[in-house]
Image: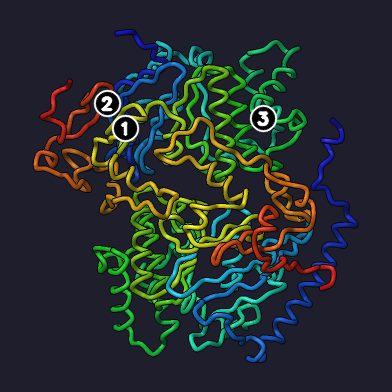
Amino acid sequence: MSEHNKNSAYISASESRRITRFNRRVTRKLEKARADAGRDPALYTTVMKDPNNVVEFDNVCTYFFSDVGTVKAVDGVNFAVPKHSTVGVVGESGCGKSVTSFSIMQLLQRPSGQVVGGEIRFNKGDGTAYNIVNTPNSVMEHIRGNKISMIFQEPMTSLNPVFRIGEQVDEVTKLHHPEMSDEDVKARTLEMLEMVGIANKEGVYSMYPHELSGGMRQRICIAIALACSPTLIIADEPTTALDVTIQAQILDLLQGLKDKLNSSIMLITHDLGVVAGMADYVVVMYAGRVVEKGTADDIFHHPVHPYTIGLMASKPVVGKKVDKLYNIPGSVPNPVDMPNYCYFRDRCEMHCERCSGLYPPEIRISDTHFVSCYRYYDEGEIVSYPKSVNVEEL
Amino acid sequence: MEQKDYLLEVDNLVKYFPIKTGFFKRTTGYVKAVDGVSFKIERGKTMGLVGESGCGKSTCGRTILRLLEKTSGEVRIDGKDIFALSKEELRQFRPQVQIVFQDPYSSLSPRLPVGEIIGEAVREHGIIPEGEFDDYITRVMDACGLPEYYKGRYPHEFSGGQRQRICIARALALNPDFIVCDEPVSALDVSIQAQVINLLRELQQEFGLTYLFISHDLSVVEHISDTVGVMYLGSMVEFSDTEAIFAEPLHPYTKALFSAIPIPDPDVKINRIVLEGSIPSPANPPAGCKFHTRCANCMEICKTQAPEYREVKPGHFCACHLYDGKKED
């Protein structure tokens, strides 16, 4: 019993001091490198691999230098968002899906949160791209909210309670289009409110957020996000806080607006049902890495990674009666101390001998379908091994 | 017809919350959170209670346990009218009925170790002689999938799923007949959800528990429940067996609610009935049928006259004017 009582989260004082010293050194160095890169446009401009993509994540590693050690929240993530399509990012809490979206918006809590490796390429439209990782704040200000915008999970907390709805939507347009007159800005805001399906737009314009229901507030958030017709909309769990009927309304609205504005959507959610209805492509993440990606058809009809299969089986589906739900045994490994074999091995019921080797490479099993699992090692072509950054070398 | 053994009978339960305004806090109106709800649950069965947020399903669950005082109506658990019990009688009755709350992060005391959280009420009610106390807690924890060495740990050391197990163990330790599960899985991840749902079902089979399962997640409700009640704005609009209600929902609100469930299959394109607008304020519900402002099949009569909640088919209750003409079979 005594050995169980030993607290694994315990850190000695000297160890704690060492971590703090290390974090300070590393984050200073990274901040300096970032500042240097930001001064030279050549260092933050690159070329898209495929000009038909809006965003390409190329081996992105986002680490948090915390007091208990380095948390590899996102560790070598590869995927792309093609133009005019919806990409669903699925995973459980803590799998790094929100951190991925914060990385592209540069909303990470710096200096402890850092993108330590890889490239995030955001298409400028002419074939060249911003490498978001090195883009300085002055440039980022013109991208954030203008070209890439975000809809957050909690409509209750993402609106400012002391400003009227109108002012909050106006603000975005004013900031990115300083040449517009006040009347034009207001006209644009009213147009946006109408677009998101608010019947009483003049009335809502002068209301405060607390006067609106959750669904209405989420519509306002969408109006704010879409005010500048962004090329990429990141929807971070946009319907989790809402009721089913309101969820259906909001999803229909998002899908309709995407086509109207010719944007792409990166839909982050843990609800497979929502993704199935909306997404063209699906990316499944587990413990900071992409375990499977492909078209919605690939993922929902031919899931191959044991985690994806388990996730699908553990969600009850209306109309399908099962006696007992499948449950994935165990829980996610400790993010501070990740194993060097497949992160899912200890919870996987299909693991084999090979799984004790290095983390499996990404394997292509069809044109659009990729999986990181040794079960398909002999069946497909190996695309890449995940690249992790060794923090000790930083 | 055989006599069914009902553990819980709720008859026309009403719960209003007064709205107080002004300096003297005069009551100027009422929030009609639960407005005449009736249903019964058979012993050993699970009833799912679904509806949008603000429809009064949680208030209903709490009033049934007398965590809130009723405004009117009757609740009988095991034949006892719980609102007629005196304070002392109620105290003795409490172990029979338990509740599992939605948020496992705020419903556990951060200052008590797990063993004490689970055991506090057991000791208080004298369920077990002092000598067997430790063994008993271990057995309860074991039934809920918690290893014994967790006893000395504190809630902050656990993940959401483990905490929900602790909450369930706490409810179970008192040997209850009836547990109200107030959205027990909505704060949890999908894979953890499955673990907790399976645990609830296993415990039901083992100990013959009766559940009132409050949730807004219809797929979970379909999975776990034997009967389902749908609430809208404080009233029960439809009640039936799970199979019947999912196969053929009668009330227009139920139809809309069910069509909004996202199906995890990209090929299934359901004809969604999208409801316009949002739920009206329960302080000032619409006249006539409460749903008529959003109903696709709204008729003249709906605007003036509230429909009667009655048995449309055997065992299938519904409150809607659409079924007025149809006689019971």
Q: Return the residue at label 2.
A: B316
Labels 3, 2: one chain: yes
Q: Earlier in the sequence, mark 1 or mark 2?
A: 1
Asked whether the residues under the numbered discs 1 and 2 touch, taking CB atoms below 8 Å apart as contact, a structural biologist would say yes
Find the residue positioned furthest to the right: A14
Labels 1, 3: one chain: yes
> Residue at coordinates 62% horizontally, 21% vertically from top-left?
B173
Q: Where is residue A306 in the image (x, y as percent from the top left)?
A: 62, 48
Closest to the observer, B132 or A90: A90
* Residue at mark 3: chain: B
Find the residue positioned furthest to the front: A379
Q: In this view, does A156 lie to the left or right of A364?
A: left
Distance Cα–Cα, label 3 vs label 2? 37 Å
Mark 3 packing: few (<14 Cα in 10 Å), some, or many (20+)?
some
* Residue at mark 2: chain: B
Residue A29, by quadrant, is bottom right
* Residue at mark 1: chain: B
Asked whether the residues under the numbered discs 3 and 2 touch, taking CB atoms below 8 Å apart as contact, a structural biologist would say no
Q: Is residue A331 above or below residue A222?
A: above
In this view of the protein, can residue B21 be seen by the observer? no
Q: Return the residue at label 1.
A: B245
